Image (tube, rainbow, N blue to C red):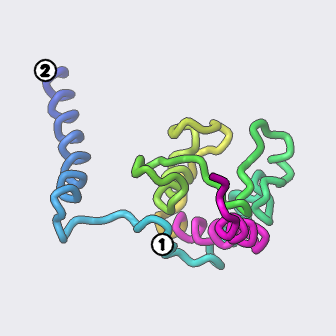
Amino acid sequence: MKRSVLLALFIVFWIGLGAPAASLAEGDPGADTAPAPNVVTGDPAAGKALFDANCSSCHGVSGMGDGPVGAALTPAPRDFTLAAFAFDADQNGTPGDDRDLVLVIQNGAMKYGGSPLMAPWPTLTDDQVMDVVAHIRSMKTDETLETEADALEEPSAS
């Protein structure tokens, strides 16, 4: 009896997970969709307050990975001013888009091959996570932007 109940619960759970993905794949206009890559819909100011309270001890207030706890961590926390994100958590072929950041914040980096030191933050709501992502995006420095622009202008060696 227990086995059949567990099997039934598993099937219900499995169908529940698969149905949204199937409706997205079929282009169901009523289906929920994830935020588009690199389209920040959160509030950076609200995200800063959340970041300062939850993330700055490791990543630092400036986002450079230089927080008081981060100094003792190996590997060091990511420097958000570089905007160089490693994980393609949603497996869409583009590491570091907004959805990737959301998933890493919600589930932790270890789930995607990263350090277990970047713990999940399941207590944040979806809107709060998007606010944090918006703040992280705002940390990219002008120096990083200038370096990227210089790289685009340099002729490639053939």
Residue at 49% x, 52% y: name it: 103
The residue type indicated by label 1 comes to: Val
Query: Mark 1 against mark 2, which lies toward the viewer?
Result: 1
Query: Can residue 139 be seen from the camera position used here?
Result: no
Residue at 65% x, 67% y: name it: 152
The relative height of residue 150 versus residue 107 in the rendered view (above or below) is below
Residue 1: numbered disc: 2
- Magenta stretch secondary structure, dominant: helix
Q: Camera-side residue: 128 or 25?
A: 25
Binning the other alpha carbons within 10 Å of mark 2 as few (below 14), some (14 to 19) or many (20 upward) gives few
Task: Let me know if residue 120 is in the magenta part.
Answer: no
> In the rendered structure, which segment of residues is drawn in magenta?
129-158
Farthest residue to the front: give it.
158
Residue at 74% x, 72% y: name it: 146
Question: Residue 24's x, y, as percent?
Answer: 23, 59
Helix, strand or loop at mark 1:
loop
Name the residue tied to disc 1: 39
CA gap, disc 1 and disc 2: 49 Å
Helix, strand or loop at mark 2:
loop
Residue 145: numbered disc: none
Question: Residue 85's x, y, as percent?
Answer: 61, 53
Task: Let me know if residue 130 is in the magenta part.
Answer: yes
The residue type indicated by label 2 comes to: Met
Report which quarter residue 83 is drawn in.
bottom right
Sequence-first disc among 1 and 2:
2
**In this rendering, position of residue 13 left or right of residue 44:** left
Residue at 60% x, 38% y: name it: 114
Question: Residue 25's x, y, as percent?
Answer: 21, 55
Which quarter of the figure is the N terminus placed in?
top left
